[in-house]
């Protein structure tokens, strides 16, 4: 294997280096109206609805084509079902700071005027920047520290991990001369229910404590409820519990969006529905037949429900659905 093994866990997870010349993806590369950055390819949290799995596959295929993986290693890095390796073979991007400096020159050039960037930079659009690997490799922290040397940026961070609170010092420093938004992601406060769809993600209480810590430190933070799972987490009691928890944790905003069921997600997610929610199989199959988006009538009804809760709990509904809407990442988004 020409990819360097950086670390290995007892349960078999391997962390390998991925040299990178570029780390910021432009809106032109992704088709989105913001720049994106993902320090890791793959994620140990292993959410069954995760839409970044196929991009991991693409990186593995490129490594094989470049002669960096033997056939046996390629099979290992794919996994028997094609989706497991995303959770157990994590690529850690290297040389990220020199790549970032060079990409930021491109970023500022595209902004038109120095110091006046036109689009936000969002960290964690495809994989979680505070997944367990970050505890050891600290790539996200290094990136934030480098971004804090600049001014006039608008930086968003999306994560399910309480590890984000470790970086409260650098987030505060970053926010002195830049706009910062931290989105703590949580789909339900019910820990047992959460475990049926998210294999190894942090428990709700830990995420909410992190949100409270960030809020108390003055970091502009809120809750992102996505994906809302039809028939599972979309009822008023579930959503209301999340809004209550957000308010109690000092969240400054809440945003939410329904599940998008991309083709690459179905192989992993639908068996989970079949196993834990068999009565919903028919509903999901029908609702998402031939497209990834939730049916428009469902999305509208959900938006109304969210809006009522927003008003009740006095939390502004952040327009993240428009700006950083959950979607299938472009293949380039995870490439080095
Ligand atoms: S935390 Fe995010 S990147 Fe990681 S598996 Fe879950 S959805 Fe995917």
Image (cartoon, grey):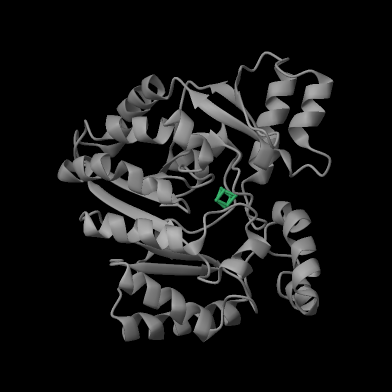
- Is residue 336 among what the camera can see? no
Which residue is at 36% across, 70% downward? 246
Q: What is the residue that sits farthest to the left in this orientation? A: 176
- Specify the quadrant that holds the N terminus: top right
Q: Where residue 19 appears, x then y in whole percent? A: 53, 19
Which residue is at 58% across, 75% downward? 233
Q: Is residue 106 left or right of residue 292?
A: left
Q: Where residue 205 appears, x then y in whole percent? A: 45, 63
Above or below, comparing residue 205 to residue 88 in the picture: below
Which residue is at 56% across, 78% downward? 234
Q: Is residue 188 left or right of residue 142?
A: right
Q: Where residue 132 appears, x then y in whole percent? A: 52, 40
Q: Is residue 60 left or right of residue 190?
A: right
Residue 102 vs residue 211, the one in the foreground: 211
- Specify the quadrant that holds the C terminus: top right
Above or below, comparing residue 238 to residue 139 in the picture: below
Which residue is at 39% across, 83% downward? 309
Q: What is the residue that sits farthest to the front in this orientation? A: 10
Q: Where residue 85 appears, x then y in whole percent? A: 72, 38
Labels in figure, total = 0
- Is residue 24 among what the camera can see? yes
Residue 207 vs residue 152, the one in the foreground: 207
Residue 249 vs residue 69, the one in the foreground: 249
Quadrant of the image occupied by residue 114: top left
Residue 29 vs residue 124, the one in the foreground: 124
Above or below, comparing residue 33 to residue 250 in the picture: above
């Amino acid at each position: 294997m020409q990819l360097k093994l950086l670390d290995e866990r007892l349960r078999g997870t391997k962390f390998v280096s991925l040299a990178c010349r570029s780390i910021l993806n432009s809106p032109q590369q992704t088709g989105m109206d913001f720049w994106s950055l993902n320090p890791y390819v793959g994620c140990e949290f292993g959410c069954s609805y995760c839409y970044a799995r196929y991009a991991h596959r693409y990186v593995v295929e490129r490594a094989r084509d470049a002669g960096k993986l033997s056939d046996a290693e390629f099979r290992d890095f794919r996994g028997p079902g094609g989706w497991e390796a995303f959770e157990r073979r994590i690529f850690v991007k290297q040389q990220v700071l020199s790549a970032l400096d060079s990409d930021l020159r491109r970023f500022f050039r595209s902004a038109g005027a120095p110091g006046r960037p036109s689009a936000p930079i969002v960290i964690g659009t495809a994989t979680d920047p505070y997944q367990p690997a970050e505890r050891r490799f600290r790539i996200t922290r290094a990136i934030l520290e480098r971004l804090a040397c600049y001014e006039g940026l608008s930086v968003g961070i999306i994560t399910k991990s309480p590890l984000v609170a470790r970086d409260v010092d650098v987030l505060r420093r970053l926010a002195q001369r830049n706009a910062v938004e931290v989105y703590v992601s949580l789909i339900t406060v019910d820990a047992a229910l959460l475990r049926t769809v998210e294999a190894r993600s942090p428990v709700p209480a830990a995420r909410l404590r992190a949100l409270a810590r960030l809020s108390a430190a003055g970091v502009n933070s809120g809750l992102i409820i996505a994906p809302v799972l039809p028939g599972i987490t979309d009822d008023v009691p579930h959503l209301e519990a999340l809004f209550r928890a957000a308010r109690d944790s000092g969240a400054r905003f809440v945003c939410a969006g329904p599940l998008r069921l991309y083709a690459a997600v179905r192989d992993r997610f639908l068996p989970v529905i079949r196993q834990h929610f068999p009565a919903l199989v028919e509903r999901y199959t029908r609702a998402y037949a031939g497209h990834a988006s939730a049916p428009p009538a469902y999305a509208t009804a959900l938006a109304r429900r969210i809006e009522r809760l927003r008003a009740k709990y006095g939390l502004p509904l952040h327009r993240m659905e428009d700006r950083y809407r959950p979607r299938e990442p472009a293949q380039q988004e995870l490439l080095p």
